[in-house]
Image (tube, rainbow, N blue to C red):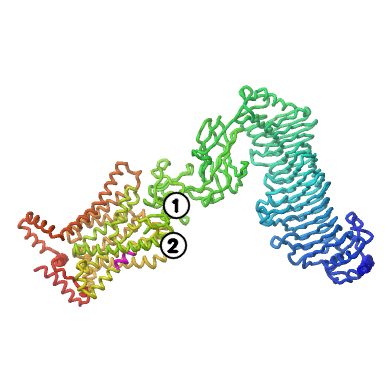
Amino acid sequence: MKELLFVLVFLGASLLPVSSQCQSLIEGEAGSSCMRDAVNTVSTGINGADEPSCITDDGKSCKSLHYTLNQINLLAEASATNTTWMVLVSSDLILTSTLAVSFGIDFSCLILCGEGAGVSKPTISTDTALSPAIHLESNEAALIISNLAFNFSVTATKSIANTSVILANFTNIAIIESTVTGSSDWLISAYSVVVSDSSFSDSCIQSAVLLIHANSVSLTSVSVVNTLFQPKISAIYGSRGAFAGSVVIILNGLGSSALIQDLIFWGVDASFKSNLSSFISSASLYVYAPEVDSRIRVLSSEFAFTQLFFNTIVTVLSRSSNIVFSNVTFHDQYLFINNHLILIILESSSFIHPVFIRDSSFYHYNGTTLGLICAGCQATILNNSFYKAYGQVFLTRSSTVTLSGINISLIQNEPFSDAALINLEYVNVNFVGHINILNNIGTPIRLTYSYMNFHEGSDVQIMNNTARFGGGLIFDEGSIFDTNSSPNALLHFENNSAVLGGAIYVRMYIAGNVSCSFIKQYTSTFQTINIVYKGNYALNKGNDILIDFGSVPPAGIEMCSSGKNYETIYSKIDIAPIQSGTSHLTVFPGQSIKFQAISISLCQATMYITCSADNKINSCPPELISLSGSSKVVILEGNHTITTDLKIKTDINVTRSDTSIDLKFQSFCDSSQSTVSVTLLNCSLGFTFNETERMCRGCDDCDSTFYQFSLDEGIACIRYNYWYGSHDGQTIIEPCFYPYCKFGDNCPLRNSNLFKLPLTSNEQCLFNRGGIMCRQCKDGYKFSYLGVQCVEDSGNCSGNVLGLLLLAIVLNVLIGFFWMYAIKCRGSLTLGFSFGAILFVAYGRLIQFGIVKEFEPIEVLMSFLSLIILDNSILGYIPACTPATTGVEQQLYNYIGPLVIICMIITIVIIANSCPKCLSKVDLIPNPIQTLSLLALVTFWSIASTSIMILLPIKIGDSYRFLIDPNIQISSYYTLAWLIAIPLLIIVIAIIVFMAISPFLSRKFNTVRIKPILDVFHSSFKDKWRWYSSVYFGTWIISIFLFNFTETQDLAFTILLAVSVFQFVFHPYAYKSLNITDTLIIIDLFTLVLLVGERIDPSSIAMHKSSYITFLVYVLVILPVLYYVFNGVMVNSWKLQCTRNIWHKIVKKMKSRSDSDKEAERIDNITVSGHYRLTQDQVTRTTVNLSTMNRKPEDFSAYRESLIDSTRV
């Protein structure tokens, strides 16, 4: 049945009309493998129908190409003979799924031909991303695709995952007069592949536009335009599985061949802008021939507009090949200098490999034009031109090279760079015919272990070139003229210039026992041919020929240091870091570079930096790292420290992290070169990174009395015990006291009394501190109680704080009982006696004893004494960590003291009102009102101190003053301040103001109900100075702010001086002893402030004066403490009967009879307030019940006056 169906199809299909264009495929070369006598023709178009009759009926056509090919496959299986199937595509077709057909029988060939003329080719396209879109396989059949257009709509954002088309296992594949746009990879495998008169444009590929595996490949009149590589990330980073390039040809088998003729490769780019050299084998063309005897010809083709800096354009990798590049053009290719336009690598050394590069032109490119690496090559570079480019022309490591008819001009490189235009290594090079190398930057020819042979009639013109070594030619490491060269050859050097060797530079780093005769014999080889020297110039030495012996000259060099057209030179230089014990030069961006240099002679060195392991010049991208300043540095003979104006600029913001670039500092002096590694640091402390200048800068606006810097020296200096840093873009120079901060070495800057800043901010800090103004703890450390010190994090900080809080409560309860006992001992004089003591301790805590290390014991003493005003900072010396991370959080713990005392006050009030008799039995509280008033005074003082410390830092304008903790979060800090600190401080200030104006309010307002409390506060003062009880408290609150600002410290001194003068002049106390005591206390405090301020800067005073001030400070601190301790001892001793008896006996002996008269006179002159105090001392120990507060005003007034009158009897 199948056989009958096949006969019907054949009879019908053979009668279908076939266009002349498609018919010619069978009759032409492309159809040579097709059976021409048995051709079955099937039509496919949008108007057809997919049914069996579309194959058998000559009047019908199929609709689906997929259906058509599957039906052909079915019929081919029924055929007993080889046939040719021609599928005529008459209209555009859209593939909705992958067209996948595997032909299971060996028919002759399959032809897919579009019926259309000119540009109106039928188009096969897809409406969705398919991978692949077409997949055809055969068992040894041929495939011809002609006059079709393919558009798979692949873009940079809509890419087929791997491939668009797979054509596999055909004997021959021909793609003729077809166009492909918006495609991904085409994978083609066959014995022979022909692609002609076709174009591939706007492709987005992962491996190749055409990836061809074949024994014979012919690409003629093909254009590959606008190719975009979209490599997988895994492939870029090392998981590469295959070759990649615009066109990749892999030749299989012996005697394989590839013909690339009349091809155009334009516009190659990649979506991933990184080093793709490990992924892309070659940007435009890659040919790989692993077997021997292959032939590769690239003829009349154009390669242009590649933007893959890391890749070659054309690569040929073969074991043994005959390679020809003829009439090719390369232009507008922009690569890095080490990458090639053409790279040929021939791996086998057992064969002779002829390589021809001829009749071609190369212009407008960056990189190296031709790289040839092989062991047995016979390369001929014939009639080629190289011009208007940047980089090198020819680099080879091969056996024999013939150069003829070459023109090289206007090739640019960095001025006086090491670049060479023609680089020949281990080569016998033959110069034939005319060669012109004109107007270039870079050494025209460089030979390494190579021989130069000039043939009869050769004419080599090397003119107007500029280089670092050899303006015309470099003989490196044993290279020499071949003595068999023709004497009629001409080598003409004219107007070339170099640093060393204007025309020829010979590097001869050989042993020191070479004789002068050898030098003369070597230079005689230069006379083998006709060499003309005209107008050549060397910047240092050797206008025509310079022989460089490096650092080891031959013996007796002075006897043959010059000869006909040549001079000799030798030099040696070593550079190293100035710092001993290190191999790296350490600088930060903007710091002047200094180094140690040892030179055997005076020379002018050229300095530069490199960023690669091979130390190649210009290896640092200028947009990344560059060197500013003069690169010419004079180095004297001997060992010297060299200071330059060279500075490194960088766009890497190294203030965040050190750079990992392999940075080196190079010195080239004559022929000697020395290198030292460079460590590019963050900006040193005292400098900030300026992104505009790309360097570190000092603070130009800072006060020079506090801060100075030198970029040349790379150091900054700060005033003693000041902290330098930045926060929110602002430079901070603020006092930072011991034991927080330390000072460094004396500043080496001229006329400076400052101290050198360390390298990093945390190095300014002592005792495990860090952060801004050393107000944080270093990693692994936590604050102790109230942030006094930083202790190691034990992991149980939360448990520690509970124990510390309990201890603080116990201490504050004891302090409460201490003040109660003071009331019992001193009676009504307690408040007057306490004002001075509280004032001394409170002001003593403001004085910056911590600035000076020698005053640390005083700081500890004042912390202990501050317990009397409920400051528990002494507990911070216990080495136990707490969970609070900022100083503000730590200050919250100091509210424990006022809270404890308030609880004690509430307890006393409750007992006094509920059980007065119970309170009267307590011997510790003889007078509740006096007790409550004193406890309230201490509480107010503690609340004010803690609240003010929490309110710091304060924002003034746009700047923050970092006084207690600059590391807090400002938003949360303001919440804390407004909810706790500010309300409490307002209450305390309101009470102080009320106490000050209450004597004046009582004249107009009835204040009888609170008069007993006010009388307690005012009782120590004369009537007209009763308001003076608020002066100490008020001035102290103001002084807290003034002392913490450098600009207002003088005002704080003035206020303290004014209070002392006022105290001395007006004697506000009713008792003369209190006036004298407080005056002396205030003068003592004022003197301490002045002395400590004088002692802050040790450089401003002599050593003997410093010791004197230290001694005086200790005396002024200890005397008030001893006074109050002595007074307390005396008061407690008076309570002993034996003490009183001894005192009375002493008094009786010393007093005269007139004492009684004087006492009477004193009583007559006593003030009303004095009467009240005397009455309190003379009345019985009966407690004044707090219930008197509930009496009527007139009763209370009568009660107070009766007490006063009783004293007058």
Magenta part of the chain:
896-902
Marker count (numbered) = 2
Q: Position of residue 712 (x, y in %)?
A: 49, 42
Q: Nearer the viewer, residue 870 or 945?
A: 870
What amino acid is at disc 2? Ile
Q: Position of residue 106 (x, y in %)?
A: 88, 59
Quadrant of the image for the C terminus? Answer: bottom left
Q: Position of residue 368 (x, y in %)?
A: 71, 43
State left or right for residue 1093 relative to residue 415: left
The residue lying furthest to the bottom in this view is: 1192
Image point (81%, 53%), residue name? 222
Image point (21%, 69%), residue name? 922
| Relative height, residue 411 to residue 827 (above, below) | above
Q: Which numbered dot is residue 725?
A: 1
State left or right for residue 994 relative to residue 620: left
Visible residue check, residue 884: no
Q: Which numbered dot is residue 970?
A: 2
